[in-house]
Image (spheres, grey):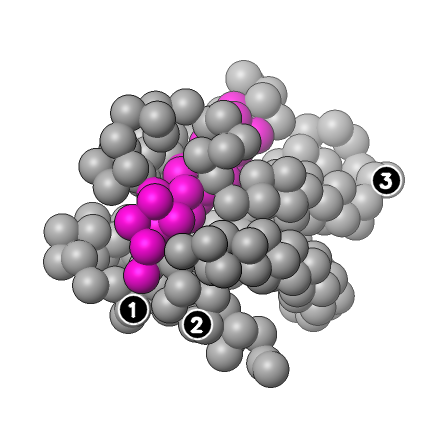
Amino acid sequence: MSEPVQLETLVMKIVADARLHARWLNTFSFMEYIGFRKIVKSQLAEQMTAQILSHAMEEGRHALGLKKLAMKLGGSDFDSYAPETMICPEAAETYIQTLDKTCEAQFAALPDTDRSRLTYLYVTWLIEKRALEVYNVYKALLPQKDIVAKLEGLLMEEGRHLQDVEAAMTSKDRQFKERADLLQPQEEAIYSIFLGHLAEALQPAAAAA
């Protein structure tokens, strides 16, 4: 089974069960929160531009919006990131942290300022590309129109982030094409592992539903 087909099959199982759907939304809220936290912690204050700060704030807003949707579907139990309110949260965090370390290794020889800025750009670029793919598959299978409306706004912002980051990468890294060609397959491998964990986590949930 190809990864797009596997993702679609998993999402179909998720949206068919309200509590499982709430856990899915809270997992993506958690991932947006990790992205917000990582941006804020990784960038030195002297290089925190308005664009980077705006991106961080939007990631935080996405995390809040997704959590509110999770609470709407699942109730007050989802007003936290307790493990039982998410689907394979450790694998979700490992995906982001592994990708971050993989990108940072490409810039190990650079000064701290350049390394942190380029790592931020590449990690963001790769995650935004993946997020757009996943959110579009999810949106296409959603029965709830109110959630679709929320996702459309989120997708618009993610698409703008992707354009902004790609423009910054091409202007600040002369080796952009070579590094992009190297890192994209590595992200695909990391994502494939996460997707496998997601499938495993859904097996007992799907059986119990």
Vertical comparison of 192 with 2: above or below: above
Q: Provide residue 26's location: percent of width, then percent of height.
A: 40, 39
Few, some or many residues within 10 Å of mark 2 (<14, 14–19, 20+): some
Residue occupying the far front of the picture:
208
Vertical comparison of 109 with 161: above or below: above
Label located before the other in sequence (1 or 3): 3
Specify whether residue 170 is in view: no
Question: Within the magenta stretch, is there residue 39?
Answer: yes
Vertical comparison of 22 with 183: above or below: above
Q: What residue would you read off at disc 1? A: 141
- Horizontal side, residue 184 vs residue 27: left or right: right
Q: What residue would you read off at disc 3? A: 109
Residue occupying the far right of the picture:
109
Q: CA distance from mark 1 to mark 3?
A: 45 Å
Amino acid carrying mark 3 in the image: Ala
Q: Is label 2 or label 3 in front?
A: 2
Residue occupying the far top of the picture:
45
Label located before the other in sequence (2 or 3): 2
The answer to whether mark 1 and mark 2 are in CB contact below 8 A is: yes
Few, some or many residues within 10 Å of mark 3 (<14, 14–19, 20+): few
Query: Magenta residues?
Result: 16-40
- Horizontal side, residue 9 vs residue 137: left or right: right
Q: What residue would you read off at disc 2? A: 8
In front of the other: 38 or 49:
38
